[in-house]
């Protein structure tokens, strides 16, 4: 898990992550493509929907919604994709817990969706914050 402000992605720190480990990409080209999309897109004017960045390999789901109380939230995970969540305006309370601490429900391979049950922690995510969840 990585949590940071989008404004820090261009810093030397992230550039260093991309060249460490014998030239291997620690964050990966796909994750950097997602972060660059967030940096270069006017998300306040973007219409809700799915935007392909690199076909089905990297895509953005632009959503507008009212956050719900944490008691109404669900725990979920993915097996094929990594989530990069970005808060554009105001703030959001986002849940996170290690997958091993939760009980797995059925997995829907078509939707890459695994429903989980249990308890976890919550993070305050102010506007401008992104989180990478693996």
Image (cartoon, rainbow, N blue to C red):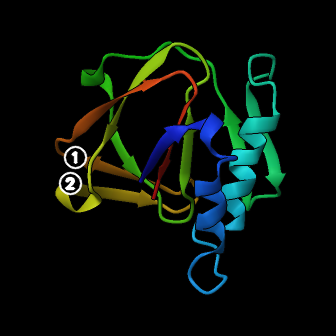
- Which corner quadrant of the image does residue 73 belong to? top left
Q: Which mark is residue 65?
A: none
Q: Relative to 116, is 5 on the left or the right?
A: right
Residue designated by label 2: 102
How far separated are the C-alphas under marks 2 and 1?
A: 6 Å
Question: Which comes before the other along the chain, label 2 or label 1?
Answer: 2
Name the residue: 27% across, 33% down.
122
Looking at the image, the residue that sits furthest to the front is 12
Residue designated by label 1: 117
The x and y percentages for residue 126 are 47, 22
User: Which image quarter is the N terminus in?
Assistant: bottom left
Q: Is residue 50 above or below residue 1?
A: above
Name the residue: 70% across, 56% down.
32
- Which corner quadrant of the image does residue 134 belong to? bottom left
**Observer-nearest of 120 and 129:** 129
Q: Report helix, strand or loop for mark 2.
A: loop
**Observer-nearest of 56 and 37:** 37
Name the residue: 46% across, 17% down.
91
Q: Relative to 60, is 53 on the left or the right?
A: right
Looking at the image, the residue that sits furthest to the bottom is 22
Badge 1: residue crowd in 10 Å (few <14, some 14–19, many ≥20): some
Name the residue: 59% across, 16% down.
89
**Observer-nearest of 115 and 63:** 63
Badge 2: residue crowd in 10 Å (few <14, some 14–19, many ≥20): some
The x and y percentages for residue 105 are 29, 55
Q: In this view, does 15 lie above or below 62?
A: below
- Which corner quadrant of the image does residue 107 belong to? bottom left
The x and y percentages for residue 92 are 43, 21
Q: In this view, does 128 lie above or below 6?
A: above
- Mark 2 and mark 1 residues within 8 Å of each other at the beta carbon: yes
């Amino acid at each position: 898990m990585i949590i940071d402000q989008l404004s820090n992605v261009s810093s030397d720190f992230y550039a260093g992550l991309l060249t460490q480990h014998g030239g291997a990409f620690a964050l990966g080209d796909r994750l950097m493509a997602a972060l660059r999309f967030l940096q270069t897109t006017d998300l306040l004017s973007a219409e809700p929907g799915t935007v392909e960045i690199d076909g089905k390999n990297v895509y953005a789901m632009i959503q507008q919604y009212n956050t719900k109380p944490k008691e109404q939230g669900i725990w979920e995970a993915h097996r094929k994709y990594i989530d990069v969540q970005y808060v554009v305006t105001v703030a959001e309370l986002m849940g996170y817990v290690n997958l091993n601490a939760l009980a797995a429900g059925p997995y829907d391979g078509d939707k890459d969706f695994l429903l989980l049950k249990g308890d976890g922690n919550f993070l305050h995510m102010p506007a401008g914050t992104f989180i990478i969840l693996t």
